[in-house]
Image (cartoon, helix red, strand yellow):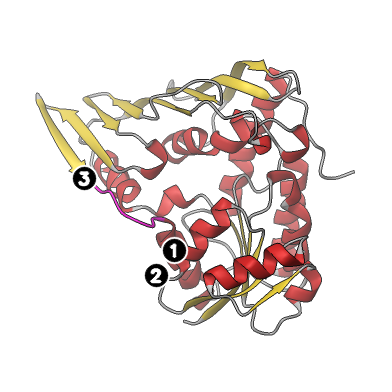
Amino acid sequence: MSVGWGFVGTGGIAGTLARALELVPGGRLVAVCSRSAARAEAFAAEHGAERGYDDVERMLADPAVDAVYVATPHPQHHAPARAALLAGTPVLVEKPVTVTLAALRDLVDTARERRVFCMEAWWTRFLPGTEALLDVLGSGAVGEVRAVHADLGFPAPPEARRFWDPALGGGSLLDLGPYPVGLAHLLLGAPDTVRAVGSLSPEGVDRQTSIALGWASGAVASLSTTVVAQAAGRAWVEGSRGWVEVETPVHSVPAFTVHADGAATRHEHAVADGHRFMLEHVHDCLARGATESPLLPLSRSLEVQAVLEEVLDQVGVARVRELG
């Protein structure tokens, strides 16, 4: 299937996806949109796109644009994503889809009412390492999953304003939290209890957070994010018969070791340009006429966002309200 993509945003993650798209059969970058026409045209020239725009509506009117990827800062996701849905254009939105649960519900309602494909860009879900991890845990090799532990973070430099500015959705949780929280949700589903502590920067964003999740089954998760310390960037999953250690960086799932029955078995799944697996999945969904991903449905995004919002509220983070 041939899919012409229009990108909204020209930052680092947009460049990562543009390079991955070059490896996806039938995928091509045809248009780029930025508030700065010069940035849009420069990004288009660098990545082989046909044209640049400084207006989302104009890009959506481009007949060559079959799907849109939104890669602006978190608080700026809602408007272009909603515009794409109203135009009937499938949209892939960088994680987290929004910075508030209300804004996400609005997009989900719009996508479902219009029957237009919409998905969060949690690329980790589609990696070979993630699929292999799910296979191992599903096989019962370590028994029933009882606990998940994961951390992610690094010292973010002061000049990297997207980590520190509330207006850009700054802080460790919104930028990094979708990975550890997403892993816990993938393995155990939506939690029944959420507890969090953290420390705030002078600007009012979270410098680091510690999250405890609980399920009615008795399963628990301990997760942490930071932009002021170097985290190990690992995860481990404890089962009733053994445990699995996921190597760093946890969001790439490059390898993991299964400890069970007195033996340790290492599984290697490192890949280059891992975002291509997510793009291939989107192409497959579009080819089948699906309006939601069966592997990453909108219900999942709502449940993860509910956890993120509860943590932000408990920690006391100053957030940008996208609606109202």
Is 271 contained in the magenta span? yes
- Kindly identify which residue carries mark 1: 20
Left or right, 289 with reference to 152? right
Any part of residue 291 in sight: yes
Amino acid, disc 1 = Ala
Which class describes the residues within 10 Å of circle 1: few (<14), some (14-19), or many (20+)? Answer: many
Q: Say which element carries label 3.
A: strand
Rendered residue at 62%/16% (across/down):
198
Of pointers 1 and 3, the one earlier in the residue sequence: 1
Q: Which range of residues does the magenta coloring cover?
A: 269-274
Where is 240 relative to 323, above or below? above
Which residue is identified by label 3? 268
Q: Tell me the tag on residue 23.
A: 2
Quarter location, residue 242 = top left
> Within 10 angstroms of label 3, few (less than 14), some, or many (20 or more) residues?
some
Residue 68: within the magenta?
no
Disc 3 residue type (three-letter): Glu
Q: Nearer the viewer, mark 1 or mark 3?
A: 1
Q: Are marks 1 and 3 in contact (CB under 8 Å)?
A: no
**Can residue 281 be seen?**
no
Residue 267: image tag: none
Dots 2, 1 in contact, CB < 8 A: yes
